Amino acid sequence: PLVTSKELFKKAYEGGYAIGAFNVNNMEIIQGIVEAAKEENSPLILQVSAGARKYARPVYLKKLVEAAVEDTGLPVVLHLDHGESFEICKACIDDGFTSVMIDGSKLPFEENITLTKKVVDYAHEHGVVVEAELGRIGGVEDNISVGEREATFTDPDQALEFVERTGVDSLAIAIGTSHGAYKFKGEPYLDFKRLEEIMKRLPGFPLVLHGASTVLPEFVEACNKYGGSIHSAKGVPEEMLRKAASLGICKINIDTDLRLAMTAMIRKYLAENPSEFDPRKYLGAAREAIKEMVKHKIRNVLGSSNKL
Ligand SMILES: O=C(COP(=O)(O)O)N(O)CCCCO
Ligand code: NA
Ligand SMILES: [Zn+2]
């Protein structure tokens, strides 16, 4: 069934693990992700960005997710990623999403609170949970482009006030991550001191880590081996993600690692099978790559195997 993340986050917080939130844009990506979760007996969040809604059109993604739930019997959270207005959050709530993010992180503090509270009030009336963002993650991806230097980390005292005044169910925090494949110029770094300060003020409150792809080198190399040109790509080491998952981070957002796995596989397949032109062949290979990537994340990063 479609479920909210309330209970999943509570168990994840207490159990010292996190739930994967994977971005979906088409059938093969959804199938690969849910097959992995089924085999790992893992809770799962499928998230749809505004860009994905435009690309696939809302009704297709909704029906594909419903099909995945029916086909696997898995409890799945259907979440709007980076909703930037009350209107898009309302549309998704009215369309049966069980969770929405209202991303007011570009707004001044007070305006972020006002907007978030408006979404929380509507969502809670409809049994839907809300994720908000305080502090700004940088990075360029799907028109979420915040100048790297403008990115400001989450202030722990503001986080406490924000949660108290909005009633939001989970909070995306900025502790050094950014969207996309170019997260760090120098050494990767997450501000765990800041995470612990936020946890002190909000004990048991679910925190969310965006921009959490590792950008695994073997997939970047595979892309480049078969015609790609991706350079200076760097992500969050899996060791840091495991540490974050063991702390108050209950939701870890992964999109770039899926994109790289899928792209590497398609490039490789086409290069090795020059006479093949049946889309099911390379899209099927891509689906397998997604599945293996998600199983790897569940086992090696999230710790959510057998937590259903
Ligand atoms: O935090 C993330 C993903 O982060 P990453 O790029 O590290 O996979 N997201 O929210 C996905 C953003 C996609 C917008 O279309
Ligand atoms: Na956790
Ligand atoms: Zn994000």
Image (cartoon, rainbow, N blue to C red):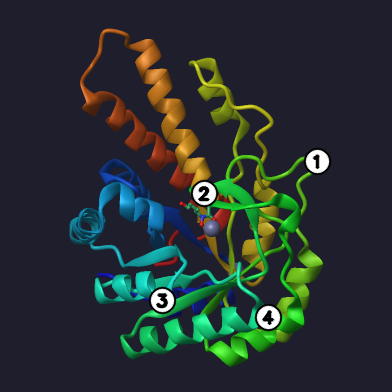
Residue toward you, 240 or 226: 226
Distance Cα–Cα, label 2 vs label 4: 28 Å
User: Residue 77: image x %, image y %?
Assistant: 36, 67
Residue toward you, 92 or 247: 92
Q: Which residue is depicted at the point 61% across and 91% down?
A: 164
Determine the secondary structure under disc 3.
helix
Task: Tell me: residue 301, above or below residue 1.
Answer: above
Determine the secondary structure under disc 4.
helix
Q: Residues within 10 Å of mark 3 (few under 14, many from 20)?
A: some
Query: Residue beneath label 3, please?
Result: 86
Query: Residue beneath label 4, please?
Result: 159
- Give left or right: position of 306 versus 224: left
Comes first in the chain, label 4 or label 3: 3
- Give left or right: position of 21 versus 27: right
The nearer-to-camera label among 2 and 1 is 1
Q: How many marks?
A: 4
Instruction: Tell me, for residue 176, which label it has, or none.
Output: none
Q: Quadrant of residue 200?
A: bottom right
Query: Residue beneath label 2, please?
Result: 297
